[in-house]
Image (cartoon, rainbow, N blue to C red):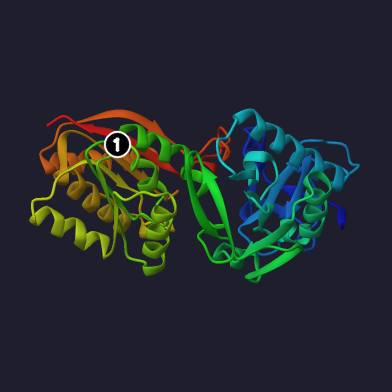
Amino acid sequence: MTVHMTPVVVTRRAVDRVRSGHPWIYRSDVVQSDAASGDLVLVTTERERPLGWAFWSSASQIALRMVSSETRRQPPDERQLLAERVRAAAAYREQLNIDATAFRLVNGEGDRLPATVVDRYADDSGVYFVVQTLSQAADRRIDLLRDVLVEAFAPRGILARNDPKVRRLEGLDERVEVLHGEVPDRVTVREGRIRYSVDLRHGQKTGTFLDQRDNHRAAAACARGRALDAFTYNGGFALQMAANAESVLALDSSAAAVQATAENAAANGLQNVEVREVNVFDELRELGIAGARFDTVVLDPPAFAKNRASVERALAGYKEINLRALKLLEPGGHLITCSCSYNVGEALFERVIESAAADAGSTVALVEKRTQARDHPMLIGVPETYYLKCFVLRKLA
């Protein structure tokens, strides 16, 4: 790998940011750099004091992503660094005793491997990794990542799902390609007692929403009576709730999602799950008009606020679905409501729920606040790593 030996000089504001624990330095805080895209560079203060080593991006507003706090002017061995951090990430997942055959092995900055995602999927045929390299530096090192994964885990196949639009911010193309071995179009994974089919090449994220796994269990623990799962995708919440609920109605606007949920329910022998292809906003309204009532409601919509400019509209959307859900919910019932929009923070999301409850004339108790699954670690002082909010609420009246 190319190491650029001329230091990148940054402002005092960037110095304070790094020393506070944040691994990103923005382009506006770079004083001097002639590095090439994806280079490993030494970062220094304007007084030439080393801060550590970082990956440089020539395109993104996130110009530097810190990878080492080592202040020696001798660069770290990149293969050794990558291998050590992958091993550390894997050791942490082993400690979690995850009751599933699909989980996140490497979570970017949360595992000190910037802009790098590695998800593990396993079925009866073997273990597969799906990787995403979301910055210039991570993408330049994708072959090194592949070699480390093969050496450490001997997977049957590795797939690069490098089709997220965020790669455009780094000047990178969008592509899906097999990096090693063979990778089937679909694998059947297990989450607790439930098995479901995952489309590795076309499914959301790297195939499915692994970050909601622990929240599926929390919803199942609350489930009773008639349950409603809005924005079901492939039935993650619905299938887990079915064991404890009398019936589950799962809603989604995607024909493919509805088909996947129905097939997954049938494969698990769940006869109490009904799936409808509908506009979820409209269906929540129609259910209310029809006088339908539920004992458990889950709201897990897609990210309404993909950027700051869309926050106001997103808040209106979150309020509408939470208002309608609370009107459908029986007293004593539970609402599990989620937001995966980073731009809508926890406090703002809570205020939206408060407003929805007031307009619904409901008294609501907070049972617990939850986040993304534990294999998606967050960094203290780095709010960008905390994106998934899940509130478990109980309607008192």
Q: Identify residue for label 1.
A: 223
Relative depth, front residue between 211 and 172: 211
Q: Give residue 336's position: percent from left, percent from top.
A: 31, 40
Picture residue at 76% right of the left edge, 36% below the top: 69
Q: Quadrant of residue 105?
A: top right
In this rendered view, identify the residue nearer to me: 170 or 304.
304
Q: Residue at x 67, y 58 (%)?
A: 135
- Counting labels gives 1
Q: Residue 14's image quarter?
A: top right
Q: Position of residue 27 (x, y in %)?
A: 64, 56
Residue 88 appears in view: yes
Q: Amino acid at mark 1?
A: Ala
Q: Badge 1: few (under 14), some or many (20 or more) residues near its Cα, within 10 Å?
A: many
Can you give x and y, in whole percent of width and height, for residue 183 in the image? 68, 62
In the picture shown, does residue 347 fall above or below 195?
above
Outermost residue, right side: 74
Q: Nearer the viewer, residue 205 or 342?
A: 205
Q: For this view, does 287 lie left or right of residue 93?
A: left
Q: Between residues 11 and 4, which one lies in front from this camera angle? A: 4
Q: Secondary structure at mark 1?
A: loop
Q: Quadrant of the N terminus?
A: bottom right
Locate residue 15 relative to residue 280 in the image: left or right: right
Q: Quadrant of the C terminus?
A: top left
**In this orientation, does residue 68 appear?**
no
Relative image position of residue 195 (x, y in whole percent): 49, 48
Q: Residue at x 16, y 46 (%)?
A: 328
> On the rendered structure, is 261 left or right of 38?
left
Is residue 107 found left or right of 367 in the rendered image? right
